[in-house]
Image (spheres, grey):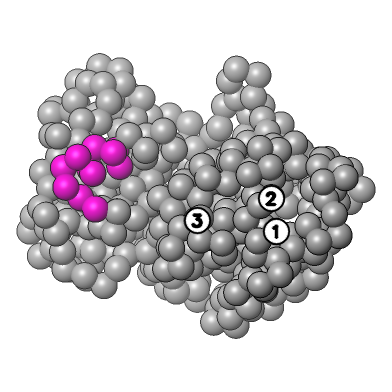
Amino acid sequence: MLSATSAPVIEATLPVVGKHLDQISGTFYETMLGENPELLDLFSRSAQATGEQRSALAGAVAAFAAHLVGAGPKSVVFDHIVERIAQRHCALGIRPEQYTMVGRYLMGAVGATLGDAVTPAVAAAWDEVYWLFAARLIGREARLYAEAGVDGTDPWRDYLVAKKIAEAHDTMSFILTPVDGLPAPAFLPGQYVTVAADLSDGSRQLRQYSLSQAATGGTLRITVRRVRGSDGAPDGVVSTFLHDQVDAGDRLRLSHPYGDLTLRDSAAPLVLVSAGVGITPMAAILDHVARTQPTRQVTIVHADRSAERHPLRLEMAGHGSRLTSCTTFVWYEQASDVPDAYHGFVDTDVIPLHPGSEVYLCGPVPFMQSVRAGLHRRGISDGQIRYEVFGSEQWRATPKRATAQLATTA
């Protein structure tokens, strides 16, 4: 709970903070990373180059402030947001002491941006918001590390690349086995791992990749699409590294599996909707359902640029064949000779939906927004839709917009 002294201050200053959120974020990142270049290893070079990542933290804190004064998402929704962030932080190996430094630079950025408007009372109120938010995250992250049996000060484990398999144009799968000879960790379908890529220039970059097959106990599999830069954006550093420099017999460092886009314990009709490499968590979910609920009704929907770029297509068909009721719908932007494939973009009116369907969604943000809107028109509620957003898009712009977008990720 926000103190009675701070609540009216936050309510009064939230609009001006929201108006200057991009400037606050830019100052925060430039100052913190400029004075602590070792932290660059935690942040995507590509996202930093395009500015995609800059609004993430400040937007999340502003959204939390709005939540505290009753202008943001409901408590149950914000609990999902905290869970999602905590899962991501554990996958990155974030430690409690790092919150102190981040808070110092964030408050410094607020002061530098708003100047004399940041009175001692305003500074104290926003510092209280930050530490309320940080305390929730630190507590949840400590529990997640403990549940996983992971030392938060050294959360990485070495894996051997047993196989490297071409899945589609610009898409490779990596079969990974623990170097220590112990079983691979158990995980829930839909979770991801972080790859800590040690690059040739001596730097390290961290990137999350969904596990693309159900837990088997012996191996993990990630399926990686090469990110090619366009419109001035650079190529993906880690995806390029994995495609060009990592082969069978090499080693990679991985985090424990994390993530909350996991399959609920339910027998309701299941709809798996993906675009591009967003198919990877859906492949793990489908594999798991085929093993454990072969009579469950499943509908698969996938969109891609072309049939040549559609990863795991035959494997998904194989999983579907193990179910008593499975229907597949595919859309390609480019015309193809794949039987029954649609040309263009996903039309949600074509998808058969049961009123009680549970929908899992993964892909680029505009795709997910479009599909979600179409599902709403068909009578599917927010509570029936779960989806994953990789990146910072859900925390951008003003607190009002940030809270609205945050709410949709639950």
Q: Distance between the residues labelled 2 and 3?
A: 15 Å
Q: What residue type is labelled 3?
A: Gly
> Label 1, on which residue?
9
Residue to which mark 3 is pinned: 72
Q: Mark 2 points at which residue?
A: 13
- Nearer to me, 83 or 115: 115
Disc 1 is placed on an element classified as: helix
Image point (38%, 29%), residue name:
309
Residue 186, x across and y down, in percent: 45, 74
Considering only vertical position in the picture, is 302 above or below 3?
A: above
Looking at the picture, which amino acid does disc 1 mark? Val
Q: Is residue 242 left or right of residue 199?
A: left
Q: Earlier in the sequence, mark 3 or mark 1?
A: 1
Is the residue marked by circle 1 packed among few (<14), some (14-19), or many (20+) residues within 10 Å? Answer: some
Nearest-to-viewer mark from 2 and 3: 2
Amino acid of disc 2: Thr
Q: Nearer the viewer, mark 3 or mark 1?
A: 1
Dots 1, 2 in contact, CB < 8 A: yes
Residues drawn in magenta: 371-381
The disc placed on residue 232 is: none
Q: Is mark 2 on a helix, strand or loop?
A: helix
Q: Give the residue displayed 30% in from the left and 42% down from the top.
A: 372
Q: Which residue is drawn at 62% across and 55% down?
A: 11
Q: Which of marks 2 and 3 is nearer the N terminus?
A: 2
